[in-house]
Image (spheres, rainbow, N blue to C red):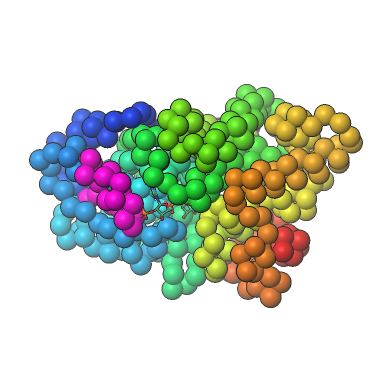
Amino acid sequence: MQDFSFYNPTRIEFGAGKIARLDALVPANARVLVLLGGESARRSGTLDEVLTALGEREVQVFNGIEPNPSFETLMKAVDQVREQQLDYLLAVGGGSVIDGTKFVAAAALFNGDAWDILLQGGQNVTSALPFGSVLTLPATGSEMNKGSVITRKSLAAKLPFASEHVYPQFSILDPVKTYTLPPRQIANGVVDAFMHVIEQYLTYPAEAPVQDRFAEGLLQTLIEVGPKALANPEDYQTRASLMWTATLALNGLIGSGVPQDWATHMLGHELTALHGLDHAQTLAIILPEMLRQRKAAKLGKLVQYAERVWNIDTGSDDDKAETAIECTRDFFEAVGVKTRLSDYGLGAEHIDNIIDSLTNHGMTKLGEHNDVTPEHCRQILLASI
Ligand code: NZQ
Ligand code: ZN
């Protein structure tokens, strides 16, 4: 096991009706900005519930944070915070709204050009406004981590930042709030959470048996509950399991003390920035060929993944690895996320541009060994058509 420092200050309030806890969680004298995505929170009644729970507090609403939240939109929220002297943020939505709120929290107190936060990956963030979240989409883990991914539309750039100053103070996880999600978003959530585990697990053996078994448990849970969550949208226990699994997949616990990969995510961000694919769609396309391309370096963990997660116990190591890769692809397809570039209207003619963009963003040494180059990524994309 590698050395690590584990810190996670986010309180989780889990269960039906927990939005009522907002009154106890948000300071009584707070001047609150509630941040929303499009129409979903308003339509589902979640916004009303939130406003009721906030009671007599001074509350303003910022509407319109888009999926893959944009710098351009978020800077308008930063202006509102500053002009109206708001001092507490509350994200109500999915990963995009929570990521966006993290950026607003940091940018509102940042001296200088806020885009520098992304250019320096958050290392220059020294403070942020306090905030909480009401999660409506299980997927990203943003509700209990310090990461955020922001898109600058004018530059076609989607970049991550991380800072201990942007952990939510609390997140409310009410599985009932996920009932209104369309199947596409549930499928995306299952794939994204699965990928978060894979990025922290499928690297090389690191003598971290408890992290491995936590990770395998999360993967098996997603394989079990993903299809059920799609088939029975109002099955509370299934949605509860999915929600908590997605949070645990990226709250820092399983990634402590182990090598981490993230190459699939970084290449995926380019596909979203340039072609607008959903985050999870990009991951479903890239992962199978990423694993195949890096099979030799990952063989130890691929065989363990095959045996323990997919119960594959026959054939050579190479056979097991190949079968596990195909099981993974089949799982993504079975929950409804297509795994080929051509499924999204993309082909060989788009790849040069994607690779140029990856290179321009400095993503030239990816993966747990820093040895995944733009040329590897080109081969991966070609094989993914
Ligand atoms: O905008 P509204 O109207 O709210 O609709 C949203 C949006 O269209 C809808 N939705 C959310 N909750 C709903 C609902 N519709 C009906 N009922 C509900 N209860 O779902 C759509 C997608 O929402 P979004 O927030 O974009 O999805 P997700 O949670 O998958 O977030 C994706 C973003 O998170 C980033 C991704 O890159 C992407 O930008 N990630 C953040 C991470 C982190 N902070 O740690 C890690 C991830 O790897 C990921 O990169
Ligand atoms: Zn992700």
Q: Quadrant of residue 90?
A: top left
What residue occupies the far right of the structure in this picture? 316
Q: Compared to 121, does 10 lie above or below? A: above
Quarter holding the C terminus? bottom right
- Give the left or right position of residue 216, taking residue 69 as reference: right
Whether residue 233 is in magenta: the answer is no
Which residue shows up at 33% across the image and 30% down it? 16
- Give the left or right position of residue 105, taking residue 239 as reference: left
Which residue shows up at 73% across the image and 54% down it? 289
* Percent position of residue 252, x then y: 51, 36
Q: Compared to 333, does 17 lie above or below? A: above
Give the residues drawn in magenta, as a range: 33-50
* Percent position of residue 33, x then y: 22, 50
What residue occupies the far front of the structure in this picture? 231
Which residue shows up at 76% across the image and 35% down it? 306
Which residue shows up at 67% across the image and 65% down it? 342
Q: Compared to 146, does 21 lie above or below? A: above
Closer-to-camera residue (154/194): 194
Whether residue 44 is in magenta: the answer is yes
Q: Quadrant of residue 14?
A: top left
Quarter holding the N terminus? top right
Closer-to-camera residue (45/307): 45
* Percent position of residue 194, x then y: 59, 41
Q: Compared to 202, does 120 lie above or below? A: below
Give the number of marks: 0
Closer-to-camera residue (324/197): 324
* Percent position of residue 101, x then y: 33, 51
- Give the left or right position of residue 63, taking residue 299 as reference: left
Q: Is residue 363 visible?
A: yes
Q: Is residue 111 visible?
A: no
